[in-house]
Image: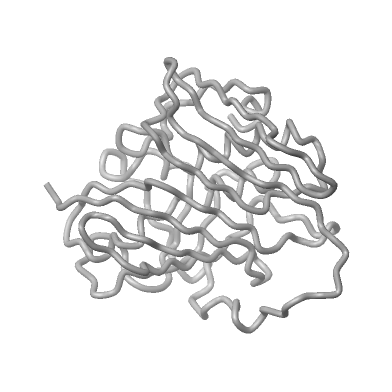
């Protein structure tokens, strides 16, 4: 689907549902795939993306419309939309930038160190239970290793663990990591004692590091994830997550505005 989206059109397969909508991470990944194709410069990596989920993206044909707003000497900004049946379903505004030579740098290795949790091989992957869990989780492996799982009535709205695709993709680049990152439940989910409707309204994804050119990310590697809920009230919450690669380097920040409802 990512490869077909690069051409501007995609057929969204069934089996990637999240309630009545297609899994948001996949939708964002489709837009990133089209943006990469248009920019056509491997040196310009995704630096920041803002995604707004306007309406549910459904299985079937989708138009992946992306335009270049401006391309400067080292950065390119784009705006994109997923359109189905003439309606905008998702918007995407992102900037891709090449590295710049600079004397200024901040060593954030201590401040951004990953919390110590059990290694992925010591934690069982959450099983996919058809009819009980969102369909897209049949494609994503999550291993909870810190905090409380969703809907357990926990006191803290925070958790962490490991993630990867159940079937390794051909490559692991910006679009794939973007598609993977949104797989976790919202940070407020552990506070509920039972399933409750909740979804992402807006998502800001910031890339804070890239792998060395001679050390590409392994498609089957586990990525560490940690999410904290900053505030939640009146049916809306704000969360910040951090993502580290297999070498323990902080690679991305994922900030979301969540809408949630009381359990039915």
Q: Position of residue 159 (x, y in %)?
A: 39, 69
Residue that protrudes farthest toward the top in the picture: 85
Q: Position of residue 67 (x, y in %)?
A: 66, 29
Q: How is the image coloured?
A: one colour
Q: Position of residue 65 (x, y in %)?
A: 59, 25
Q: In screen coordinates, is 47 left or right of 202?
A: right
- Decide which of 165, 91 is in the foreground and name it: 91
- Decide which of 127, 67 is in the foreground and name it: 67
Q: Residue at x 70, y 54 (%)?
A: 218
Q: In screen coordinates, is 157 left or right of 261?
A: right
Residue that protrudes farthest toward the left in the picture: 264
Q: Residue at x 56, y 64 (%)?
A: 243
**How many numbered discs, if any?**
0
- Decide which of 217, 25 is in the foreground and name it: 25
The image shows residue 21, relative to residue 112, as above or below, that is above
Q: Residue at x 24, y 75 (%)?
A: 155
Q: In screen coordinates, is 231 left or right of 195?
A: right
Q: Residue at x 63, y 43 (%)?
A: 175
Would you identify the image quadrant in which residue 84 lies? top left
The image shows residue 186, relative to residue 28, as above or below, that is below
Q: Quadrant of the N terminus?
A: top right
The image shows residue 150, relative to residue 92, as above or below, that is below
Q: Position of residue 38 (x, y in %)?
A: 73, 31
Q: In screen coordinates, is 222 left or right of 131?
A: right
């Amino acid at each position: 689907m990512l490869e077909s989206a690069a051409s501007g059109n995609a057929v969204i397969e069934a089996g990637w549902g999240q309630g009545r909508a297609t899994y948001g991470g996949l939708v964002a990944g489709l837009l990133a795939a089209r943006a990469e194709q248009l920019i056509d410069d491997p040196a310009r990596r995704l630096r920041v993306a803002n995604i707004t989920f306007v309406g549910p993206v459904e299985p079937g044909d989708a138009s992946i419309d992306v335009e270049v707003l401006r391309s400067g000497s080292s950065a390119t900004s784009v705006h994109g939309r997923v359109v189905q049946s003439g309606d905008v379903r998702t918007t995407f505004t992102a900037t891709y930038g090449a590295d710049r030579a600079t004397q200024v740098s901040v060593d954030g290795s201590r401040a951004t160190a990953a919390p110590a949790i059990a290694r992925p091989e010591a934690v069982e992957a959450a099983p996919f239970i058809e009819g009980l869990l969102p369909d897209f989780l049949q494609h994503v492996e999550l291993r909870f290793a810190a905090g409380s799982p969703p809907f357990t009535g926990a006191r803290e709205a925070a958790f962490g663990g490991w993630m990867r695709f159940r079937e390794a993709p051909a490559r692991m680049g910006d679009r794939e990591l973007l598609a993977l990152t949104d797989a976790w439940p919202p940070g407020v989910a552990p506070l509920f004692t039972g399933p409750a409707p909740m979804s992402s309204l807006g998502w800001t994804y910031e890339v804070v590091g890239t792998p060395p050119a001679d050390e590409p990310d392994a498609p089957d590697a586990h990525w560490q994830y940690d999410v904290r809920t900053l505030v939640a009230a009146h049916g809306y919450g704000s969360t910040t997550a951090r993502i580290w690669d297999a070498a323990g380097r902080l690679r991305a920040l994922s900030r979301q505005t969540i809408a949630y409802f009381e359990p039915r």
